[in-house]
Image (cartoon, helix red, strand yellow):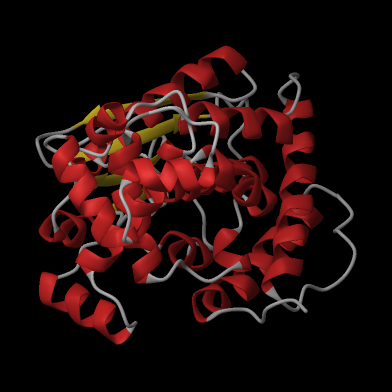
Amino acid sequence: MSEPVNHVASKVLGPMLVLLEQELARADITRPDGVPVNGEQFAQWYLAAVQALEVYVAERDNHPPVTNRDIQMMCRCALTALTLGEAIDLVGDFADMLAPRCGATSLTLLDDQTAIFKMDSYRNSNDAVANLVDITGLYAFYQLFQWLVAAPLPLRQVGLGPCQREDVMPLLNLFGAPALASGPLLSLTFDTRWLAAPVARRSAELTDFLAHFPCSIFHQQTDSLAEQVATLIGAHLDQQMALPSQADIAATLQLAQSTMRRKLQQAGTGFRRLRDQCLYERACECLADENLTIEEISRQLMFADTTAFSRAFKHWSAESPTAWRRRHFTSSSV
């Protein structure tokens, strides 16, 4: 059974549905069938409506529309980055390859604290229909960036492009930030420190993300705090970065350390337990690869030496890494 619309989505579903229907009517496009009553249905309806509007606008601009395959390939490209800043650069390179149908994106640093992601769609006309298509594209980028770092990305301001809109309220709810409704480009303004945030997702998670992209806000609840913490720790291991401290994770999630500690305790866990669980699971994955030596695994998991790794692993599993590997993979030779 489909999940009911969550609290966040409930503020957005109705107004966005009305806004999309207005633009479909303005373009004389038949609305998608059905009336969505939950998040999953709205995600399907939203994608069908946006795709129909994208085809309409692209035909007016005399170039092919952006396809689902284009978007999926862009997401796969971004997933190869080490940090959000690198992912944004890769998105820009990918958009350049698809020009002019995908427009252009860029990243500007106003100062040490302010970054602006800009999107220029190269539209021949900036009417309300084209503008809404571009805004949904900007929202898709926003959803991708948040998913990559596995954390909410607070925005200082959103630029909604050169078309003067009277119906800004649904878009304020969509982005959760102040909106500039008649600026030259579409844009997302945020704190520069997010550019250094590690890409926290793994390729195995991409299929599920793409199944609902860019409508995750409408389809599913946000990951629990414990899941977010574990994902961020795993990202540092994937990128061979020093393991984050509790203070690092709290800062990334924009929580006070005391608040994060209390919420994790309420969930029946703690930062150290999550960190150890991540290390243990990753150690087991590495031990399953018989081409990796114990010394190589120790280095990958950021231990000072094999002795420290073996001591920790025995604490987690009550046996040494060599014994664990031998018990699970009898052909192994360490």
**Residue 49 drawn above or below residue 54:** below
Q: Residue 156 location, x and y as percent?
A: 26, 54
Q: Residue 221 location, x and y as percent?
A: 53, 71
Specify whether 306 is left or right of 282.
left
Q: Quadrant of residue 270?
A: bottom left
**Residue 239 seen in the current view:** yes
Which residue is located at x 37 percent, y 39 percent? Answer: 199
Which residue is located at x 79 percent, y 37 percent? Answer: 56
**Residue 57 drawn above or below residue 47:** above
Count of numbered badges drawn on the protein = 0
Specify whether 254 is left or right of 29.
left
The quadrant of the rendering that contains the N terminus is bottom right
Q: Quadrant of residue 81?
A: top left
**Residue 122 drawn above or below residue 144:** above
**Residue 187 drawn above or below residue 94:** below
Q: Nearer the viewer, residue 254 or 261?
A: 261
Q: Nearer the viewer, residue 196 or 102?
A: 196
Q: Residue 230 location, x and y as percent?
A: 34, 58
The quadrant of the rendering that contains the C terminus is top left
